Image: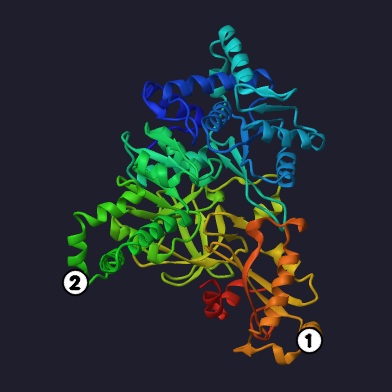
């Protein structure tokens, strides 16, 4: 638990308590020297002094374009220590999106992880009148007219040599209500939204999570998600606050590092947990037939135990497997995991239960960028598959109907959240802020219910954003709009929540289709057009419309689709009176078709 009210407090306490302890065994996923808490604290002070010496002050906005590495954390904490607001983003952000974010936020300086990222910023600089400086997060650079991190630290050291309390004075001015960071959500249909999170927001979340889960100084955290993502960020702060070790990895090295680092704490998106589960299953199936059959029975027993519905035979088999078989399964995740958190999407129930039965205690949680991010999480003592646990301390969750009235326990409705972690609003966007914040409550846009024991279960999403299994956010509306530009497509709905890729149901323009393919070749089965000539035609149309040259990213491509004869109408309940699509109703009505499509 932390009593720090601002990040300057948090940084100072960690530096004083754990000065000689190693925080980062390596500086980046690929390696590098270790860093102690004391060294990090000194480096933070030097960079903060350098920023202040350049005229960057409390309340100013600074871009931070980088992947996970020591320098990212250093820049982040340096800004936080003197009340500068950072605006983080990954190096894979498109130039167009980066331009919007840096311009909208009014960033005066931007950090770039390397020369390549800095070149992108240079190309945009003419359209960013407020951007005065670019700083490469490295000791050297091949570029002209840019600062390096070494330059910034050198300036900071000189300033501190003349005025030892230079940073300390600035730190004392920082308040809990100061904006720590502005995190822009992915946006494609409309402009990205800048979520303003204060020092109090994030520290309250750190406090609530630390009280819900028991972290100790002996814990080793493995960090694989983007450090600027709110979910990974709060876990990294928990490690820093608790005197733990934090090891950076990436998706190319994750399997190797799970075994090499043997973390005790690991936060990941569902797709990574699925990959671990699938790897165990595949390894079992590669054995000789009798052994593979036996191991399959063991995995089935693990699922039943995880679901708390194992019969006597399954319990016995599970007990027998405890000594030699299950430890080998657990080795896929390092073998020491104490706290394994899943967030950023829905964890498939069979994966959830199986890993729990194996002894990899995945704690499914729930949160959003707007909630700093954690709202609820399961605990090792009460780890029930199919739920997202109970709210963290000081957090309230209500289930309401479309009109905002509270619903009884067990009924499905819209999730509303209230607590100290709720964002201050969307930066320079009062209209969108008013849509989601009412009387201190945040409308999550998700559908769910509260169980009698207080556990929350998510049942769907009322808002349009799709979160893929890998944690990527996709806005479906502009994809649907693009599909409807084809004369062959009257309507379309894009789907893919918690899936590996997108799918779509398209509703054809029958007159146009008949001009291309005779009706006798449509092959209509249960209202779905299955004819091969029709499917070839629509596959070609979809691929052409969503091509990269039209500005679509690979994850925005539609991998699978179905062609449904009956259109969405007001009469069949799939459109509102204002002709807006009822997404969750369409998904429910065509549930079997969708399941088969993604099958």
Q: Nearer the viewer, residue 477 or 70?
A: 70
Image side of residue 284 versus residue 138, left or right: left
Number of labelled discs? 2
Dividing the picture into quadrants, the one containing residue 320 is bottom left
Q: Marks 1 and 2, how far apart in space?
A: 59 Å
Could you tell me which quadrant the N terminus lies in?
A: top left
Q: Nearer the viewer, residue 566 or 533?
A: 533
- Using the image, tell me which numbered label, if any, was put on residue 338: none
Q: Which numbered disc, 1 or 2, marks the residue that appears first in the sequence?
A: 2
- Using the image, tell me which numbered label, if any, was put on residue 313: 2
* Position of 161 relative to 254 (above/below): above
Percent position of residue 490, x then y: 75, 77
C-beta proximity under 8 Å, tags 1 and 2: no
Q: Which residue is mark 1?
A: 514
- Secondary element under disc 2, as helix, strand or loop, is helix
Q: Residue at the location (53% across, 32% down)?
A: 73
Image side of residue 295 versus residue 190, left or right: left
- Whether residue 384 appears in this view of the structure is no
Image side of residue 126 versus residue 553, left or right: right
* Position of 132 relative to 93 (above/below): above
Crowding at dot 1, Cα within 10 Å, few <14 / some 14-19 / many 20+, comes out as: some
In this view, the residue farthest toward the top is 162
Q: Residue at the location (78% across, 36% down)?
A: 123
Percent position of residue 169, x then y: 56, 18
Percent position of residue 57, x then y: 66, 25
Dividing the picture into quadrants, the one containing residue 352 is bottom left
Q: Nearer the viewer, residue 456 or 282?
A: 282
């Amino acid at each position: 638990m932390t009593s720090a009210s601002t990040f300057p407090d948090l940084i100072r306490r960690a530096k004083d308590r754990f000065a000689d302890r190693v925080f980062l065994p390596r500086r980046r996923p690929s390696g590098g020297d270790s860093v102690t808490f004391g060294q990090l604290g000194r480096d933070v002070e030097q960079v903060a002094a350098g920023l202040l010496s350049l005229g960057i002050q409390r309340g100013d906005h600074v871009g931070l374009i980088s992947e996970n590495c020591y320098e990212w954390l250093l820049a982040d904490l340096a800004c936080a220590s003197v009340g500068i607001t950072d605006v983080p983003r990954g190096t894979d952000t498109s130039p167009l999106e980066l331009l919007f974010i840096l311009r909208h936020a009014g960033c005066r300086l931007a950090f770039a992880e390397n020369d390549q990222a800095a070149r992108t910023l240079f190309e945009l600089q003419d359209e960013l009148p407020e951007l005065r400086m670019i700083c490469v997060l490295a000791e050297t650079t091949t570029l002209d007219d840019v600062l390096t991190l070494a330059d910034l630290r050198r300036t900071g050291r000189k300033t501190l040599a003349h005025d030892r309390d230079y940073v300390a004075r600035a730190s004392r001015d920082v308040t809990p209500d100061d904006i720590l960071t502005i995190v822009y959500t992915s946006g494609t249909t409309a402009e990205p939204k800048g979520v303003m999170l204060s020092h109090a927001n994030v520290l309250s979340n750190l406090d609530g999570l630390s009280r819900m889960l028991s972290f100790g100084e002996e814990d080793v955290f493995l960090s694989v998600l983007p450090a600027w993502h709110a979910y990974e960020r709060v876990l990294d702060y928990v490690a820093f606050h608790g005197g733990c070790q934090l090891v950076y990895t990436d998706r190319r090295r994750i399997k190797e590092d799970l075994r090499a680092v043997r973390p005790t704490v690991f936060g990941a998106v569902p797709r990574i947990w699925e990959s671990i589960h699938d790897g165990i299953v595949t390894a079992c199936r590669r054995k000789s037939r009798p052994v593979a059959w036996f191991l399959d029975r063991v995995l089935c027993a693990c699922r039943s135990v995880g679901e708390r519905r194992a019969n006597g035979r399954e319990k016995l088999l599970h007990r027998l497997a405890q000594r030699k078989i299950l430890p080998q399964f657990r080795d896929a995740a390092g073998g020491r995991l104490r706290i394994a958190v899943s967030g950023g999407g829905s964890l498939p129930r069979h994966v959830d239960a199986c890993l729990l039965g194996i002894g990899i205690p995945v704690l499914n949680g729930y949160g959003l960028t707007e909630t700093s991010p954690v709202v609820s999480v399961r605990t090792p003592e009460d780890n029930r598959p199919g739920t997202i646990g109970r709210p963290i301390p000081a957090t309230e969750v209500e289930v309401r109907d479309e009109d905002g009235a509270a619903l009884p326990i067990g009924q499905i409705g819209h999730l509303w959240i209230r607590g100290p972690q709720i964002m201050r609003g969307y930066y320079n966007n009062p209209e969108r802020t008013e849509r989601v914040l009412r009387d201190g409550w945040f409308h999550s846009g998700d559908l769910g219910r509260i169980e009698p024991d207080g556990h929350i279960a998510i049942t769907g999403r009322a808002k349009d954003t799709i979160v893929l299994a890998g944690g990527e956010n996709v806005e479906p509306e502009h994809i649907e709009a693009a599909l409807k530009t084809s004369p062959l497509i009257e309507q379309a709905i894009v789907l893919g929540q918690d899936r590996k890729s997108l799918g779509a149901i398209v509703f054809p323009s029958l007159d146009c289709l008949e001009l291309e393919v005779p009706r006798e070749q449509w092959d209509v089965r249960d209202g779905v057009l299955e004819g091969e000539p029709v499917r070839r035609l629509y596959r070609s149309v979809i691929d052409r419309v969503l091509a990269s040259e039209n500005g679509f990213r690979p994850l925005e491509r539609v991998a699978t689709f179905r062609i449904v004869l009956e259109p969405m109408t007001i009469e069949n309940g799939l459109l509102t009176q204002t002709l807006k699509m009822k997404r969750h109703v369409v998904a429910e009505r065509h549930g079997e078709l969708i399941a088969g499509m993604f099958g």
